[in-house]
Amino acid sequence: MVVGVDIGTTTVKAAGFDPGGAMHSRVEARYELHEPQPGWVEQDPLAVLDAVVGLVPKTGPVALSSAMHSLVGLDARDRPVTALITWGDTRASAQAERLRADHPELHARTGTPLHPMSPLAKLCWLRENGVQAHRWAGVKELVVHRLTGEWAMDHSTASGTGLMDLATLDWDPEALAVAGVTPDQLPRLVPVTERFGELVVGAGDGPLANLGVGAVEPGVAACSIGTSGALRLMVSEPAIDPAGRSFCYALTPGHWVVGGAINNGGVVLDWLSRTFAAPVETLLKEAGRVPAGSDGLVMLPYLLSERAPHWSTGVHGAYVGLARRHGRGHLVRAGLEGVCQQLALVLASLVEAGYEVGEIRATGGFSRSALWKQILADALGIPLGFTRGREGSAFGAALLGMQALGIVDSIERAAGLIEVSETVEPAPEAAAVYVEQRPRFEDLYRRLT
């Protein structure tokens, strides 16, 4: 059995899988996000580290997955000197906009959009604000170091930093110069299948989510909605959209992931639950009684700003078209629809870049809601396939671990273990509503920036 450990934004999950893909164990632990100032979204690195290491079994093979784009500074004794700055942090917005204007070539070379989520932009902000460190790392590197004593970053995670050249799989000299760091301040780069004893270093959660749902063949995309959301497609070589709408992240040789992530997924439903002081189940039931399109009400769900496909940092959320006829169910359904419409824009950007998408495998906490699954299928206009008893990125990590250990001989063979247990077809009338509504949705985005 191989245990896949998925270090998410607010939860770490560890699940054990046998070579046939069956799950035999599952545990999880939660940790807090802190917002000490507007735009700052960070965590206590030691609290996260303790939660993760507490779930890692003491014996047996383990493979890691983690949320991408995190950054923490450490002193010469490897003690944190900063908070763990997460992907949702936007304090480096000005630096990201400056990078977009002055160094657009870095997106094409590193595959990472020039956005405040990027450790490159974060490092620029930290340098300009006088913050220094002996070493810089992300959350998974902290875990690897605690478990093995090694400072190592896999190519997949590194491809989300804005600091690694996709062509050479080495740190990009220009990016490092812009960030004001040197290679010896960063972990050494290793393949995702690198082993330290029984620990397989693993990869970023986005690429592993594709593997975890079997979305590795041409034309099969993966879509996830957890705290945030993403839509990704696996390709055979690095590729960058000339319009700059997508990312490109590494997995293994011959397997790269293109797509876009959105900041606002389940966080929107959590916010609605807190705001209305009502259980999620109650709100979903009310939203289910509202027709597609929410009777003309549109929510721009940008509670944490937004990422793909526009990668602008100056947008905020809004309800538009609010009228007396609208009730709480309308407000909730419009929020769910807004998240799904944003993912539809990501899908459209991939199609416009020349990729064909005929099937989508979906995963994430949203799949516990039949309503949200149907809204997503309707908004994307493509059937959604769901797998039973899987843990998305944790399963992807376990499959990658099996490849590293020689249990399976290829990613394609690993993906062959995965079967779709449920398919949600788009409802034609609802899908037509969302197609008609989408130009207005996108125009409102532009008006709010």
Image (spheres, rainbow, N blue to C red):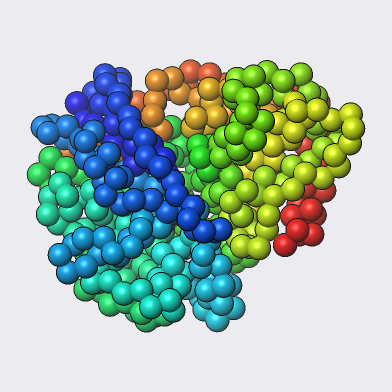
Give residue 156's position: percent from left, percent from top: 35, 54
| Image position of 445 (left or right of 22) | right
Give residue 335's position: percent from left, percent from top: 69, 37
Give residue 171's position: percent from left, percent from top: 31, 71
Q: Residue at x 46, y 63 (%)?
A: 118
Q: Quadrant of the C terminus?
A: bottom right
**Quarter of the figure with residue 165:** bottom left
Q: How many marks?
A: 0
Q: Is residue 26 above or below residue 251?
A: above
Which residue is nearer to you in this view: 26 or 421? 26
| Image position of 272 (left or right of 293) | left
Q: Residue at x 66, y 24 (%)?
A: 283
Which residue is nearer to you in this view: 180 or 40? 40
Which residue is nearer to you in this view: 410 or 192? 192
Q: Quadrant of the N terminus?
A: top left
Q: Is residue 322 above or below residue 286?
A: below
**Quarter of the figure with residue 52:** top left
Q: Residue at x 26, y 49 (%)?
A: 46
Give residue 373's position: percent from left, percent from top: 61, 26
Q: Examine the rendering and report whether any part of residue 298 can be seen.
A: yes
Q: Is residue 224 above or below residue 80?
A: above
Q: Residue at x 45, y 72 (%)?
A: 125
Q: Examine the rendering and report whether any part of residue 190 can be seen.
A: no
